[in-house]
């Protein structure tokens, strides 16, 4: 990740144009990575832009972002309720507004059309902190 000030626009550009690298032996593997926020980030803004990188996402799947909530039990559909954001239009970023000050956990997980996480799981997670203004 670049050093210094990083804008939401530059993070979105990175997510949209960063090429996926082939896995071992040249085979592509399904992968989701959270590019922003970075692990352990200390954010000064309550507006948190989650930016993803996807590699070889199978057709008929979408990414779900979970902010400060746990995944439902295996084989259960991921609900449409606060804390769960379904990126079912191919989006690679989402802005969370008015995130409370303090520690947070963001999970990105790949789900099928029935909103059930794929198996084996394809996911990433980061922990970050929104700092109170001093």
Image (tube, helix red, strand yellow):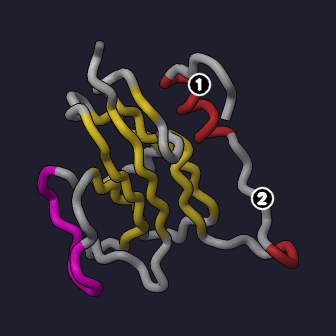
The picture quadrant where one finds residue 56 is bottom right
Q: Nearer the viewer, residue 11 or 100?
A: 100
Task: Give the image location of residue 36, x and y in percent.
Answer: 50, 40
* Secondary element at image label 1: helix
Can you say whether 113 is above or below 108 in the image? Answer: below
Q: Residue furthest right?
A: 25
Can you say whether 77 is above or below 132 in the image? Answer: below
Q: Which mark is residue 107?
A: none
Horizontally, residue 76 falls left or right of residue 122, namely left
Q: Which residue is mark 2?
A: 21
Screen quadrant of the C terminus: top left
Asked if disc 2 and disc 1 are in contact, CB closer than 8 Å, the reply is no
Q: CA distance from mark 2 to mark 1?
A: 20 Å
Is residue 122 covered in magenta? no
Q: Main secondary structure of the magenta part?
A: loop
Horizontally, residue 49 falls left or right of residue 73, namely right
Q: Nearer the viewer, residue 94 or 130?
A: 130
| Point 34% across, 52% down: residue | 105
Badge 1 crowding class, 10 Å Cα cut-off, few under 14, some 14 to 19, many 20 or more, is: few
Dot placed on the residue nearer the N-terminal end, 2 or 1: 1
Q: Which mark is residue 10?
A: 1
Task: Give the image location of residue 66, x and y in percent.
Answer: 29, 56
Badge 2 crowding class, 10 Å Cα cut-off, few under 14, some 14 to 19, many 20 or more, is: few
Task: Give the image location of residue 64, x and y in percent.
Answer: 34, 59
In this picture, which residue range is highlighted in magenta? 72-82
| Point 44% across, 85% down: residue | 119
| Point 60% across, 30% down: residue | 13
């Amino acid at each position: 990740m670049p050093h210094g000030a990083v804008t939401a626009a530059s993070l979105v550009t990175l997510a949209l144009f960063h090429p996926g690298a082939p896995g071992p032996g040249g085979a592509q593997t399904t992968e989701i990575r959270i590019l922003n926020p970075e692990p352990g980030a200390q954010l000064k803004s309550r507006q948190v832009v989650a930016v993803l990188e996807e590699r070889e996402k199978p057709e008929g799947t979408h990414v779900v972002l979970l902010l400060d909530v746990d995944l439902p039990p295996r084989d259960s559909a991921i609900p449409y309720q606060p804390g769960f954001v379904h990126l079912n239009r191919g989006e690679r970023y989402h802005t969370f507004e008015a995130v409370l000050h303090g520690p947070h956990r963001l999970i990105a997980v790949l789900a099928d059309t029935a909103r059930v996480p794929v198996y084996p799981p394809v996911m990433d997670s980061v922990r970050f902190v929104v700092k109170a203004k001093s």
